Amino acid sequence: MKNSIFENIIAGSYSLVLHIGLVALFVMGMNTQTRPVMVQPHVDIVKATVIDENSILAEMVRQQEVEQKQRKAEEDRQKKVDKQLAETEKELARKEQEVLAQQERAKIEQQQRELKAKEQKDKIHKLEQERKVQEQKRLKAEQARIVEEERQQQAEQASLVAEERKQKIEEERRAAEEKKRLAEADRKAEEQRKQDAEKARKLAEEKKRKAEADRKAAELRKVEEERKAQIAEADRLLQESLAQEQREQESRRIAGVVNQYAILIKQRIKRYWIRPTGKSDDLVTTVKVSLIPGGDVKSVIIVKSSGDQIFDRSVENAVFKAAPMPWPTDPEAAAQIKELQINFTATR
Amino acid sequence: MNKLLFRVIGFWILLLPFHAHAVLTIEITGGSEAALPIAVVPFGSEGFAAPEDISEVIRNDLASSGRFAPLPKSDLISSPHEKAEINFGDWRLLRSEGLLVGKVSSVDGETYQVQFQLFDVYKSQQLIGKRYQVPASGLRRLAHQISDLVYQTLTGEVGVFSTRLAFVTDMTASDGKKRYTLEVSDADGANPRSVLQSKQPILSPSWSPDGERLAYVSFENGKAEVFVQEMRSGRRDSVAAFKGINSAPAWSPDGKKLALTLSKAGNPEIYVLELATGKLARITHNSQAIDTEPVWMPDGRELVFTSDRGGRPQIYKVSADGGRASRLTFEGRYNASADISPDGRFMAMVHASNGKFYIAVQNLTTGTVQVLTEMGHDESPSFAPNGRIILYATEQNGKGVLAAVSVDGRIHQRLGESGSDVREPAWSPIRK
């Protein structure tokens, strides 16, 4: 591991340098605007720092091949565009000028660059040295760091394990808790459900009970109303009956009075009736008697004659002689007495 | 509640008759047969004294009948003589059913005018009114006629006040011998006239149905003979003078025959004598018993007589043509001297009980017997022509007197005032 990282670092360094170089080259190449073939020497330069020559070579070959292909294509294209070239000759010439100027500038720049490259080489060397030292130091530090890191990692690992365990425990706990919670929740839910059910049941029951109560109350109310109505009806009937009874009592009282007076009148008339002797026993005379208040006789009308004038007269006279009849003070009784029908029968 | 309802309905049912407002009806049965109260106001006489107090005669007639109760004179509130003077209310207060008013005025010295009016007090209405002119001698008889009219008007029955009574009196004359007199009086026993006088006994006077003749038994010829005497002329004939006893004559209802008791065959038997022809028919044939005292049933088809054929005197009935007799009386050991009421419903008789003789009446329909008298010395019952009263002879202080009793036994009266013994009364029929 250590090695790979290390190697990686080295490779990275190389790669960095190479890339910087390549970039520089490319920039330079771009600056010169030379033909591609002119770029080659730089490739050589780079070669010197190749670490993996084969791959670069291969790359180079591949690049060459590409370039060749490109060249070929270019050539083909050139051929094709010869005419265009001719046309662009002037352009080229101008560009040549420019390129010359460019070259000049490039020479100077080359020198500068070479200088710079030398300086840079030194510098790089020095830097390399420093870097090596630093690298050493860094390696050491790195190693220490790695150790430390490892230790730390181990610690961390342990911590992690612990942590994991803890977490696991925690998780388990949590799971348990969760489970418990879930169970609890379930239980609670169940309970809730039960409660709900109970509540619902109770509610339903309550509702039912209430409905029943309502129904009973309504029934009771109805019964009560009926009872009240019955009581009222009974009361009414009672009142009516009482009134009726009172009327009847009054009627009975009056009837009693009337009866009493009828008897008195009968006795009185009978006392005054002198029936002619020697008459047949089956003579019957019916008279209608009208009395005036006080009991005096207003009229005696023979409704049905006996056929015997003398007998009839005895009857009439009996009524007249009996006057004034016993007369009730009660006006209603008197009213019933003021008109009488009397049947007189000769029978001894 | 149902109970209540039931009660309510029950009451209604109970009370239905009351609610029907039927006229109160009273039943009265019976009543009394008491004397009818009548006010007989003394007739006005316009300042002279009438030879007869007509109203007084009437008053007595009515009272004697037992059917009327004339108010005492002291109760008379006023003395009206005609309708204009009457305040009917006054008489109603007295409970008088009838009111008789009248007056007598002198036409000349011998003739009187009499008028009367009978009022129904309660109707303030005249029931009858008449006016007469009579000689002074006719005043009393007129009074009886008025009595008859009043009686008839108020009772509906024929009055008998104008009828007469026949009876026999006997008295011991100054020579110590008996004198028998057949007399006829007014119905009230007053005004007796002698019809026949004899030193020998006179018995069993009997009025002809027309009231013009009397048949009787006289011993004037030394034995019992039957005579018929005309009242007006006084002519008399012996109709039965057979050997033996000739007695107990009784006129048939048609007045053509006499039923008699004759013993010409040796034993007293009942015969019927046809007056016009003298033809005699024997009715009874019982030689072992005495058959006597025949009377006719009103229809004239049967005879009722007394016979001891049963051992003791009892009354029997037999066809007027003869035949088998049937016994009528079964109460008591002695029943005799029958008389039949004009309507044929009752038989009066002498009924003996405990050795005493009473007047009894037997209902011929029912057979019931009612003893009417109380003294126990009674004989010879005779019905008044209206059948209401039975005249009979009785004894008072050892002397024979006339008495009358109503058929129902309620009214008793003595008739006549005579110093002599009175026997064998017979009530005349209504004068035609």
Image: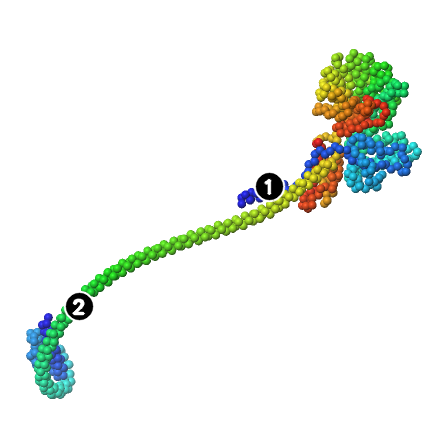
**Residue lying at 24% horizontally and 60% vertically, measured from the top left:** A176
**Residue lying at 75% horizontally and 36% vertically, measured from the top left:** A313
Q: Are marks 1 and 2 on the same chain?
A: no
**Where is A299 relative to B368, above or below?**
below
**Where is B430 relative to A6, above or below?**
above
Q: Chain of mark 2?
A: A
Residue B87 image offset from top left, x and y in percent: 81, 42
Q: Secondary structure at mark 2?
A: helix
Tell me if mark 2 has few (under 14), some (14-19) or many (20+) residues whose alpha carbon lies within 10 angstroms of its own: some
Residue farthest to the front, as pictured: B397
Please name whichever residue, B338 or A49, is drawn nearer the observer in this view of the structure. B338
Q: Secondary structure at mark 1?
A: helix
Query: What's the amino acid at mark 1?
Result: Ile
Residue A308 image offset from top left, x and y in percent: 74, 33
Locate the C terminus of chain A and report the quarter of the image it occupies: top right
**Where is A94 relative to B252, above or below?**
below
